[in-house]
Image (cartoon, grey):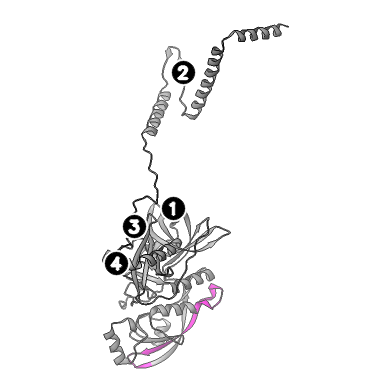
Amino acid sequence: MSSDLEKSKNKRAMAAVPEEVLAKKRNLGREEGQEEEEKKDSPALLPMPRGSRGCFIDPRWLTAKIAKDKMDAAKLAAPIPPVKIPTLEHFKPPPRFHTRALLPLRESGSKAALSAAKSLVGISSSLGSKPLKRCSGLLIDWDEESKTCVVLTTAHLIRTKDSPVNVWFGGEEYTSNADVTVHLLDGTSEKGQLLYYQPHYDLAFVRVKVDQPIQLPSFSEEVTFAEEVLRLGRDNMLDLRITYGRAAYQNPVIDERYHYMYFDCADDDNDDDEYDSGGLVISLDGKIVGMFNISSRGSFIPSSILLSCVDLWKKYGRIPRPQLGMAFEAIKLLEPAHVDKIWRMCHIDDGLVVQEVLKGSPADKFGIERGDIVECFNGESISNTVELENRLMNTCKGLSDNYNDLIEVHVSVGVFHTLKKQRRIGELTVSVSDLGEVIARGTHLLF
């Protein structure tokens, strides 16, 4: 009974309280609840304990208070970064393509470059905290199941030391422990996995995670002398670099392999190719005719050799190559007066002049000497070193599916011995390797 009477008294007391007072109490309760929530979101402040002689400020509380005040001040003072809108940016292309000199190529060249660029990415390497190289790379394969892509690029990416003399003497050093990063077209970067590198062709294969399907590139194996081409690369901001030039066949110089063609730039003095190594050389219809490989003269690996390298890598996981133990110059690429003299003295105006023979090699044992002329290889006439390289690679394509069985191959060479004025056909058994071929032993300087 007493509890019922108390409840009745409370109801009458509540009824007697004005509505304004009740509203204030309710608002006060809500404000106290908000303060509690704000305390949860703000940095915790230590309490101020009460001592026996009154109030004092705990130093820990003061330190936390100062830190909070500094944090709040920093938030207010921090500038809001501007939003970059790519369509409104003042964009300055790395090299300008829309120039008066290239006006005839503006439409076709732009279309070709933009099409091929969809397969072109940036790629960089580092060793520990030290950057090694920033290059370009080509997306060549995409696996839908694993959502990964293979990037083909230059092995300069992981080269830590150049040859002290020239490539035919050996001595280059590479590191497979480098950290590789692939810079994708959407502006993101992904860690890459180095799958394989081949020092003779200076190529490297890298796997990277790519969620979306890619546009696979289109190749052309035909590139003619002095054909108009474009060189494409991506700089350290991923901006597309486009450089106009012409494709050229030239005899290699002392520090070059003999499987290269050359990018002849109209403005060699101002040609900045820092990021273009591993980039593309394309025809004006947008097809890839080679991969740029920085050298003293702007060399590139023609697509016929690139495609053979990719095919062999997919088959063996390596790129085997027969090693002849010789270096050459093409007669047709010599000065006309020199070609005339060879024809007058030897009645030959085509073939490869032997510039170096490795001592103890099958060619040396057969009697081939510097100055002799190789006129044919495996029964077919030969005119330049790119043709020879393609023939060498073809000898490995139809052999055993097991790389370990590729120890040596048999090749045939037709030789004109210049001093003896004698022609012979030699059957040579040469070793197969995916290492860089070493020919010179210090007896001669090549070329």
Amino acid, disc 2:
Pro
Q: Are marks 4 and 2 in contact (CB under 8 Å)?
A: no
Amino acid, disc 1:
Gly
Q: What label sits on residue 49 in the rendered view?
A: 2
The mark lying in front, picked from 3 and 4, is 4
Which residue corresponds to mark 4? 101
Which residue corresponds to mark 1? 187
| Secondary-structure class at tag 4 | loop
Q: Is residue 155 above or below residue 74?
A: below
Upstream in sequence: badge 4 or badge 1: 4
| Secondary-structure class at tag 1 | loop
Upstream in sequence: badge 2 or badge 1: 2
The quarter of the displayed image where residue 182 is located: bottom left
- Disc 4 packing (10 Å; few <14; some 14–19; many ≥20): few
Which residue corresponds to mark 3? 93
Upstream in sequence: badge 3 or badge 1: 3
- Disc 3 packing (10 Å; few <14; some 14–19; many ≥20): few
The quarter of the displayed image where residue 419 is located: bottom left
Q: Are marks 3 and 1 in contact (CB under 8 Å)?
A: no
Marks 3 and 4 sit apart, C-alpha to C-alpha, by 16 Å
Residue 378: percent from the left, percent from the top? Answer: 46, 85
Q: Are marks 2 and 3 in contact (CB under 8 Å)?
A: no
